Amino acid sequence: MKSRAAVLWGPHQDWQVEEIELDPPTKGEVLVKWEAAGLCHSDEHLVTGDMVLPAEVREQMGLPDMFPIVGGHEGAGVVLEVGEGVTSLQVGDHISASFVPACGRCHFCVTGHSNLCDNGALTFGRGQISDGTDRYRCKGQGLNVLAKLGTFADHGVIHESSAIKVDPDLPMAAVALVSCGVTTGFGSAQHRAQVQPGDTVVVVGIGGVGINAVQGARIAGARYIVAVDPVEFKQKSALDLGATHAAASMAEATPLVTELTAGKMANSVILTPGVLYGDLLGPALTLTGKGGTCVATAVAPMTQTEASINLFELAMWQKEVKGVIFGAGNPRVDIPNLLGLYKSGQLKLDELITQTYTLDQINEGYEDMRQGRNIRGVIVA
Ligand SMILES: NC(=O)c1ccc[n+]([C@@H]2O[C@H](COP(=O)([O-])OP(=O)(O)OC[C@H]3O[C@@H](n4cnc5c(N)ncnc54)[C@H](O)[C@@H]3O)[C@@H](O)[C@H]2O)c1
Ligand SMILES: [Zn+2]
Ligand SMILES: [Zn+2]
């Protein structure tokens, strides 16, 4: 069939909305009509080149070029057709995408860490999960599909392991958010930092991910939640959604957290800025107290290998630095759970959607993200 998708032909370019050819779903796959797609910062790393391996490194590793690629890994849609052998979905089902496709059978899935499913290795790689071939074509060539999802499109053919069935009465834009940003931010606070009642938590960077670290910390019972972002609108949004204090920078937050905690500093610091640069780790560990945890959630440039931290303090004050992907949980548990918290009014999702766009307005949406105008922008059909 013919459809449309936002394609990135290479780094340092705009997204191009192209007419594409889509093959029907085969074994284990479903055809989805995408209804909503969140503009997560992770797609932006393809545009800036931060999440693109230098050509010489890629060739050394024997990997194919990741471009041209259909973007988007946060999304919600309706199943239009099911391929052979699909057991978990039917035509008409509403789904949330899962940006890590959890197979349910690998070592990590069966030990309760589906966010680390071996299928995650396919995030940037070519071809479908089912058989490694392409389903998408444009201008005579096969297209890669980000995270095997490609939610910046009218339609997609995805594997059933990438789709989580959700209640059909939920608004699609809200459902889209849990397929990456909400689950990632919330899980960074609850699963990875393991925020406890009474804790002091600092969240650095208030976008679609960080705002949900704030919400995760609030629901976990944190006493103080300090939101750090240079943009005033972000600080205000965080204060509206559960932060108790706000600051424009980690430097500004340091005396504030010192005062709030009588010098004990934060139990956890969660790093969710647009890009994780090495020089953010030092000030983040200054904010982290004895026995505390610093969670690195933001994506760093792929070639970034240096960060300056005080190693004496790391050991002597028994601090932890932890990475996290997709909130360190299990999408098949966490996505329905978060949507349940949304239904009961405890987790705010509608309030996170600052602006909606059509697929054709995708570049405008990303410009708004760069300018700090959105908590989350969402493309709606
Ligand atoms: N680990 C994962 O599984 C995972 C999943 C999704 C997204 N991410 C990453 O998380 C990060 C955040 O994503 P997002 O979609 O919320 O981004 P976003 O662009 O919507 O928000 C980032 C915010 O950080 C703020 N910021 C930038 N530099 C800062 C600094 N030095 N101090 C304080 N605030 C700063 C910006 O003003 C902005 O408000 C990105 O790097 C994204 O790629 C990681
Ligand atoms: Zn994302
Ligand atoms: Zn798995």
Image (cartoon, helix red, strand yellow):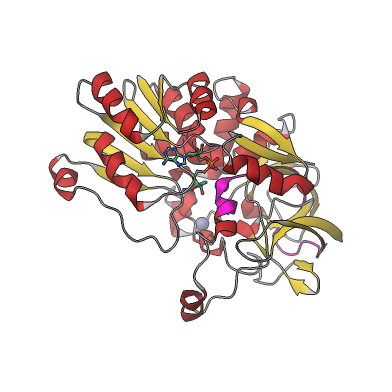
The N terminus lies in quadrant:
bottom right
Q: Quadrant of residue 317?
A: top left
The residue range painted magenta reads 21-44
Q: Quadrant of residue 21?
A: bottom right
Query: Looking at the rendering, which quadrant does residue 244 occupy?
Result: top left
Q: How many circles with numbers are drawn on the protein?
A: 0
Residue shown at the point (51%, 22%) measured from the top left: 236
Image quadrant holding the C terminus, namely top right
Whether residue 335 appears in this view of the structure is yes
Q: Is residue 299 left or right of residue 346?
A: left
Residue 10 at x, y percent in the picture? 64, 66
Residue 293 percent coordinates (x, y): 29, 39
Task: Find the residue positioned furthest to the right.
Answer: 1
Residue 247 counted in the magenta span: no
* Figure check: 136 above or below 63: above
Point 27% across, 45% down: residue: 282
In the picture provided, is 309 more to the left or to the right than 98? Answer: left
Q: Is residue 257 above or below residue 66?
A: above
Name the residue rendered at 64%, 71% in the picture. 132
Placement of 52 over or under 59, stated as above or below = above
Q: Position of residue 341 (x, y in %)?
A: 56, 25
Q: Position of residue 79 (x, y in %)?
A: 77, 47
Tell me the residue at 65%/51% (across/down): 72
30 magenta-colored: yes
Asked whether the viewer can see residue 38, the reply is: no
